[in-house]
Each structure stands twice: as structure tokens, then as C-alpha cells.
Image (cartoon, rainbow, N blue to C red):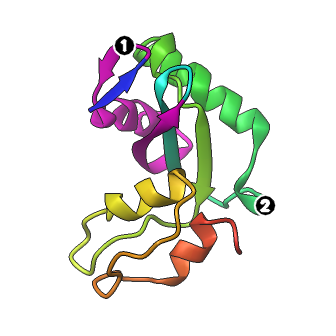
């Protein structure tokens, strides 16, 4: 659960809205601290097709934010959207949310990553690739 400007939102709600967009294959949403809102919504998105260069596409970001606003409401619009080739998952396919939460907060990853399926994805998510 996220607490955005006093509103309680489930991460699954925002993820479902993002995945309902025709260009989005997969999404993971986490919260990061925000001085004004309390928590800001940070989304990691895997697109159908090619990932934008550098993981940034302002036009698509605005389109996705508007899409989520239509599906759920303006309060649920992600503050940040980062595009990636894949999400960090265990070998059994579970998304490692503690890792994406650390990346969204700008923290150094010090947790155990031995169960991670593809460690290279962490560098991409951190913007080092």
C-alpha cells in the first residue's frame, strides 16, 4: 500500500492500470519518500517492443500518466516511470520488490542478490547501462 497525499493506493491497482495500456507488457510499482506527498509513485515498465534509449521517453511517459489518470484517478499518476528490458526476478519468477524499492529511493543495493535470475538488470535499472 502507498500513502499518496493522504490517499491509500494499492500498488497492484496502478500496475494493473499500466499493464492495461497496449504498449505495456509488465509493470512494477513502488513508493519512494516525497516531502510534499509523503510517498511518490515510482513505476518500472517493460514495454512491448523496444525500450527507449536511456530508459526515458517523455511523450510515452505523459501518455502513460494520462492513461493511469483515466483508469484510476489523477492521484494515482506515477511521478516517475523508468523503462527497462526486464524486471529483477528470482529464478522462480517473483519480482524482487525490495531491490526496485532501493533503486527508486536511490539507495545502494546491499541486500542479498544470490537468487536474482539476471544480475545485469540491476545496472540497467540504476541507469548505469
* Farthest-out residue, front: 35
Badge count: 2
Tell me which residue sits at (44%, 83%) in the image.
Answer: 118
For the magenta stretch, what is the residue range? 5-34
Residue pointed to by mark 2: 53
- Whether residue 42 is visible here, answered yes or no, is yes
**In the rendered image, which quarter is residue 55 located in?**
bottom right
Quick check: is 16 in the magenta stretch? Answer: yes
**In the rendered image, which quarter is residue 3 located in?**
top left
Position of residue 61 measured from the top left corner of the image (x, y, whole percent): 67, 35
15 left or right, relative to 120: left
* Farthest-out residue, bottom: 114
Q: Nearer the viewer, residue 103 or 49?
A: 103
Position of residue 51 measured from the top left corner of the image (x, y, whole percent): 67, 59
Residue pointed to by mark 1: 6
Tell me which residue sits at (54%, 23%) in the image.
Answer: 67
Position of residue 86 measured from the top left corner of the image (x, y, whole percent): 49, 66
Could you tell me which quadrant the N terminus lies in?
top left
Eye-nearest disc, 1 or 2: 1
Q: Which mark is residue 34?
A: none
Quick check: is 4 in the magenta stretch? Answer: no
Q: Nearer the viewer, residue 119 or 5?
A: 5
- Whether residue 47 is visible here, answered yes or no, is no
Tell me which residue sits at (77%, 38%) in the image.
Answer: 58
* Farthest-out residue, left: 92
Could you tell me which quadrant the C terminus lies in?
bottom right
- Which mark is first along the chain, 2 or 1? 1
Q: Residues within 10 Å of mark 2 (few under 14, many from 20)?
A: few
Secondary structure of the residue carrying tag 2 is helix
Amino acid at each position: 500500500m502507498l500513502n499518496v497525499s493522504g490517499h491509500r493506493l494499492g500498488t497492484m491497482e496502478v500496475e494493473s492500470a499500466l499493464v492495461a495500456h497496449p504498449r505495456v507488457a509488465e509493470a512494477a510499482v513502488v513508493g519512494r519518500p516525497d516531502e510534499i506527498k509523503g510517498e511518490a509513485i515510482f513505476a518500472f515498465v517493460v514495454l512491448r517492443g523496444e525500450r527507449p534509449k536511456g530508459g526515458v521517453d517523455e511523450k510515452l511517459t505523459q501518455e502513460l500518466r494520462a492513461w493511469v489518470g483515466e483508469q484510476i484517478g489523477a492521484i494515482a499518476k506515477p511521478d516517475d516511470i523508468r523503462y527497462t528490458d526486464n524486471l529483477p526476478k528470482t529464478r522462480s519468477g517473483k519480482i524482487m520488490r525490495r531491490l526496485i524499492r532501493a533503486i527508486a529511493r536511490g539507495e545502494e543495493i546491499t541486500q542479498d542478490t544470490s537468487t536474482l535470475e539476471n544480475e545485469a538488470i540491476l545496472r540497467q535499472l540504476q541507469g548505469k547501462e
